[in-house]
Image (spheres, rainbow, N blue to C red):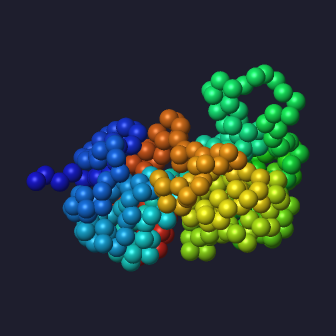
Amino acid sequence: MCMKDVLITRRISDAAEQTLAEAGLSVDVGTNEPMPRERLHASVPGRRGVICLLHDRVDDQVLVAAGPQCRIFANYAVGYDNIDLEAATRRGILVTNTPDVLTDATADLAFSLLLAAARRLIEGDHLMRSGRWSGWSPLQLLGRDPTESILGIIGAGRIGTTVAQRSTGFRMRILYVDQRPSTEIERFGGTRVDMPTLLRESDFVTLHVNLTPETHHLIGAEQLALMKPTACLINTSRGPVVDERALVEALSSGRLGSAGLDVYEDEPALAPGLRELDNVVLSPHLGSATEQTRARMARLAARNIIAALDGRRPETLVNLDAWKRD
Ligand code: GLV
Ligand code: GLV
């Protein structure tokens, strides 16, 4: 069998394949569906590089199956919690992600969820489609003002900072939590506080952290209990950062005002009761889902593969130690 250089585990923007082909690399592409685990195992051996997706669990077994000639796994996402980084580093396999190119798109989606939840846009849409709307009414579907509200940003990285930038147009007061002070977010008026202060004072809380063992269930029953009963929680990061069952409980008991979610603990499944709630806006993991952004992610992943196979350091290398080893 003639083995192609690069595997792309699922059909993504054509820009990836084009960029790789222009560099003289041969490419196999999966189908429109996630590649089943057994197929992933059977498809990686002999590859020089792999473009993988956030639902591909790349553990040590997959890395071993790929073989010693494999130089890089390029994740088609900014998050890389699906990859065993430590194992990749130990085996000298480079791991890259797609930061920066999706920052604006993800910040825009976080803001879309915030506005939709605040102004009850989806409930309004459902009412219009139901044929039950009887005309303007003074007390119908009253939401909450984003303008001059307090925005709590958890994680002051690129996306959190870009959300802060968006919020200045709404004259929001910005509180943030991060391990380190960020001059970037402070440029937009952000004040660094501790987590309980942020949760108690914010009208909107938005999550922009990576999923790690430390951020798993960062927001659970205890944290939700600190939030204002009118507050809104936005999650465009990773589902397991929030205890989804505790969130359903807080939203259904009126303990929390509303939520806007793009990511879920056990995608594509939802926690029991979540889909029945009116006070939550649900989107299907659309953070980076624009034509332009997905094409930029595809080109970046492809450039990372090309660089690694040329012996150059990829632009967005995650495990620097795997590079330093050589
Ligand atoms: C998408 O969720 C990403 O991490 O890029
Ligand atoms: C991701 O790119 C982040 O830093 O928020």
Residue drawn at (69%, 37%), measured in percent from left and top? 123
Residue drawn at (52%, 41%), measured in percent from left and top? 289
What percent of the width, then of the height, locates residue 128?
67, 26
What percent of the width, then of the height, locates residue 142?
82, 38
| Quadrant in the rendering for residue 233 | bottom right
174 and 69: which one is in front?
Answer: 174
In this rendering, would 246 be left or right of 180?
A: left
Task: Let me know if residue 137 appears in the view.
Answer: yes
In this rendering, would 233 be left or right of 7?
A: right
Please state, as top left, top right, bottom left or bottom right, where the C terminus lies in the image. bottom left
Residue drawn at (68%, 66%), measured in percent from left and top? 219
**Extreme residue in the left direction:** 1
As drawn, 306 above or below 224: above
In this rendering, would 88 be left or right of 137?
A: left
In this rendering, would 272 be left or right of 141?
A: left
As drawn, 26 above or below 250: above
What percent of the width, then of the height, locates residue 271?
55, 59
| Quadrant in the rendering for residue 218 | bottom right
Residue drawn at (86%, 61%), measured in percent from left and top? 201
**Extreme residue in the top direction:** 135
203 and 169: which one is in front?
Answer: 203
143 and 193: which one is in front?
Answer: 143
As drawn, 90 above or below 256: below
What percent of the width, then of the height, locates residue 116?
71, 40
36 and 168: which one is in front?
Answer: 36
Task: Let me know if residue 191 appears in the view.
Answer: no
